[in-house]
Image: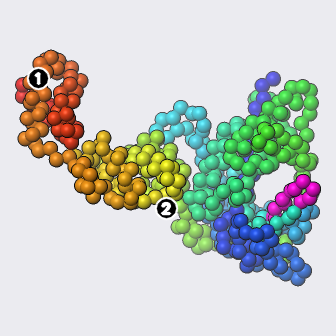
Amino acid sequence: MQYEAVIGLEVHVQIRTESKIFARVRTGYGFEPNTLTDPVVLALPGVLPVMNKAALDAVIKAGLMLGCRIAPVCKWDRKNYFYPDSPKNYQISQYDQPICSGGSVEIELPGAARNLMGEHRRIPLTRIHLEEDVGKLNHAAGDSLIDFNRAGTPLMEIVSEPAMHSPDEAFAYLTALRTVMIYAGISDCDMEKGQLRCDANISIRPKGEQKLGTKVELKNLNSISFVRDGISHEIKRQIALLSSGGKISQETRDYDGMTGTSQALRSKEMAHDYRYFPDPDLMPVKVDDAWKDQLQAECAELPFEKQRRFFEQYRLPYTITSVLIPDRGLCDYFEKAAGHAGEGRAQAVGNWIVNDLLREMNVQKQSLAESKVRPEHIAELVKLIDEGTLLSNLAKDVFVEMAATGMPPAPIIEARGLKATTSVDELERWCREAIQSNAKSLADFKAGKDSAINAFKGPVMKAAKGKANPKLVDETLRRLLAQM
């Protein structure tokens, strides 16, 4: 029997705020354990939570960017469970009135035959809600230690519909969602720091069947690659189980990305197991149109919208945009450089950025902010090549020196004597001599063989000691050949 996988993802995104969601203590990563706490975080008797508006702003902004319906009123609920990482023995979350519902995430389908943009589809969302993060358990050989530094950090949970059918689709979804969150400035989404965490709900059903199968939740997917690998592993496990006459249990499983195996953790809880009820210490929040309009004005351009604009405005090919788009800072850098370079030079600017700039950053182990090459330097380099002042075969050496020193290209060209200085009269004399010394290529060209012109270019460049502008060489040769 042939089976189809059905996949839904629950993605938790830590929101980048100065303080925690219901307390004044700061957020952060890498601090000494249990130093980012206060009486509210530790749930000491008599303390009350106070809502952090910046966290709610971030969730509404995410909802607006993903096309969600923003609830006019949202409330806070207590999700009750007993586990050491939760100091209150309940988590303040949202149950039946989430702040965002509906919406979708645009993805580029993997493995599709790409035209200018590739084949895209939208993965529908169920909801986005806001809650507080819990502490972190650190397990050793004989005991477990709790660090409450993470507890109370604002956490956004983004729940997709069960609308994906392959590990690659899930990979594309998570990649696209992460890029949107970074573009918006909502989160840095560093999975190693726990700022982005993902649980996958996976079921299989016979192909053509509409009813969903029994789902299994997969946890501990701590990299985007492990999400893809873990889902692939779970699909194979479920198919093998059914094929051998077994039965799939609704459960939560732990995936080990290093070994590619999983093990059962517990039976899957249902909503009633958490005994949700409205939090009596927090008032409902009303979101009016003025609030939404203000946040809408702050929303960044979505990644794929930017890619489409780069195609249309700058005529950039997919090979360049696919490198630029995942990094908003690199996109901004490109647009500054293209603006300085002027009309018709954007593609050349893009090539220098995605090939040479990124290569030198990698060699020198630099971030974009640390790179010594400014956007206007790349623009100037492209102009000098386009105007014939610098030959393209020498430009890469100039760029390497730009990256090492931070100098603009003009003084480097001057200091190293790389400026193309051939006069028009000299160039024409060398071209005539090249034509007159190669009668066969002249005959071939006059007979309609356009490539025969290349036989004249080598002698001309040799006579010019490599400093002739190839474009002017070609134009001069064609002008003289037309007269013969």
Mark 2 surroundings within 10 Å by alpha-carbon count, few (fewer than 14), some (14 through 19), many (20 or more): few
Vertical comparison of 361 with 451: above or below: below
Question: Mark 1 is on which residue type?
Answer: Ser
Vertical comparison of 213 with 369: above or below: above
Mark 1 surroundings within 10 Å by alpha-carbon count, few (fewer than 14), some (14 through 19), many (20 or more): few
* Residue picked out by circle 2: 369
288 relative to 330 in the view: left or right: right
127 relative to 261 in the view: left or right: left
Question: Any magenta on residue 240?
Answer: no
Vertical comparison of 483 with 153: above or below: above
The residue at the point 18 percent across, 30 percent down is: 459
Residue furthest to the front: 416
Q: Where is residue 159 in the image (x, y as percent from the top left)?
A: 73, 53
Spatial separation of the CA atoms under disc 2 and disc 1: 54 Å
Question: Mark 2 is on which residue type?
Answer: Ala
Q: Position of residue 322 (x, y in %)?
A: 50, 44
* Residue picked out by circle 1: 437
Question: Any magenta on residue 142?
Answer: yes
Query: What's drawn in magenta, residue-wise?
Result: 134-144
Q: Is mark 2 on a helix, strand or loop?
A: loop
